[in-house]
Amino acid sequence: MTTQAEELLGARVTATDGKVVGTVEQVFRDDVDGTPAWARVKAGKTGRFVPLGSSQVTADGLSVAFDSQKITASPDIDAGQHMSAAQAEELSRYYGLTIPAQQKRGDMAEEQGTMPTDEWLVRQEERIAVGKEMLETGRVRLHKYVDVESVEQPVHLYHEEYDIERIPVTAEDRISGSIAEGEQEIILHEERAVLRKEIVPVERVRLRAKRVEEDTTVSDQLRRERIEVEPDQQFAASHGGEKGTNSGR
């Protein structure tokens, strides 16, 4: 933002949802290039900070690229007359802004006259998170076929045959008659096997999925940062070749 800080004092601050959150009561400049970076907005009895890099000056005041809820929920920082690098970094993280690169150790020492105490290297590492997904591994189908087989079943049957029975006639039978033709007829019978089929249910069959528990092992490669001390070789050579190495994991 190229607007002078003095022009922003007293400007009405409007959020993206159209709500007026307050007025600018103080402007903080960037320590590197001196441009206006943060504005303290007076909202009632409280004060909140908004970034000026993404804000626009309009005829109605200062338009901020965040909604009123985001602004009013911002960190409560007591900056006094100067905002420290740690405070600016905290606000930048909250608003999702890019954090400026750190100054070199020698530059900060010259500007402040003291050794910095808030410079840190952050060592990071990857960690694995195991999830689960359901995959189709195959399909099984039941199909009913009709098979034909020969069977034998024993059965007891009978049939009739004729037999001639001859009995001599005696005087006591007192049978008399005349000579003439005659005949006798009998009906012969036999049993035959009669097959009858009936359908009888004998079994119920169906498919179902059976859950089988098992333990397995998954493998992958993870990256891990390593921080080591790299001494100045020229400095070490000028001091008798003394050097040391320290590493952190």
Image (cartoon, rainbow, N blue to C red):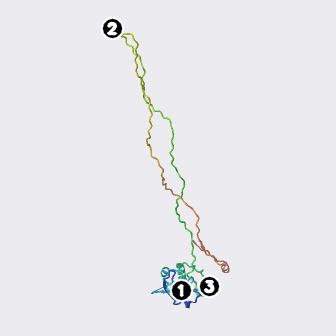
Q: Secondary structure at mark 3?
A: helix
Mark number, residue 238:
none
Give the residue type at disc 2.
Ala
Between circles 1 and 3, the one closer to the viewer is: 1
Between circles 3 and 2, the one closer to the viewer is: 2
Depth check: give the residue in front, 134 or 221.
Answer: 134
CB-based contact (under 8 Å), mark 2 and mark 1: no
Question: Which badge, 1 or 3, is on the more N-terminal residue?
Answer: 1
Q: Position of residue 191 (x, y in %)?
A: 42, 27
Among the 4 quarters of the image, the one containing residue 182: top left
Q: Secondary structure at mark 2?
A: helix
Measure how far apart labels 3 and 2 are at the Cα level: 165 Å
Q: Position of residue 109 (x, y in %)?
A: 60, 85
The residue lying at 33 percent from left, 8 percent from top is 171
Question: Can you say which quadrant of the picture contains the C terminus?
Answer: bottom right
Label count reads: 3
Q: Secondary structure at mark 1?
A: strand
Which residue was labeled with disc 3?
Answer: 107
| Horizontal relation, residue 121 to residue 75: left or right | right
Depth check: give the residue in front, 229 or 149.
Answer: 149
CB-based contact (under 8 Å), mark 3 and mark 2: no
Depth check: give the residue in front, 177 or 232.
Answer: 177
Which residue was labeled with disc 2?
Answer: 171
Among the 4 quarters of the image, the one containing residue 114: bottom right
Give the residue type at disc 1.
Leu
The residue lying at 53 percent from left, 79 percent from top is 95
Question: Which badge, 2 or 1, is on the more N-terminal residue?
Answer: 1
Give the residue type at disc 3.
Asp
Which residue was labeled with disc 1?
Answer: 62
Q: Position of residue 115 (x, y in %)?
A: 58, 84
Q: Position of residue 192 (x, y in %)?
A: 44, 29
Q: Specify the farthest residue to the top.
A: 171
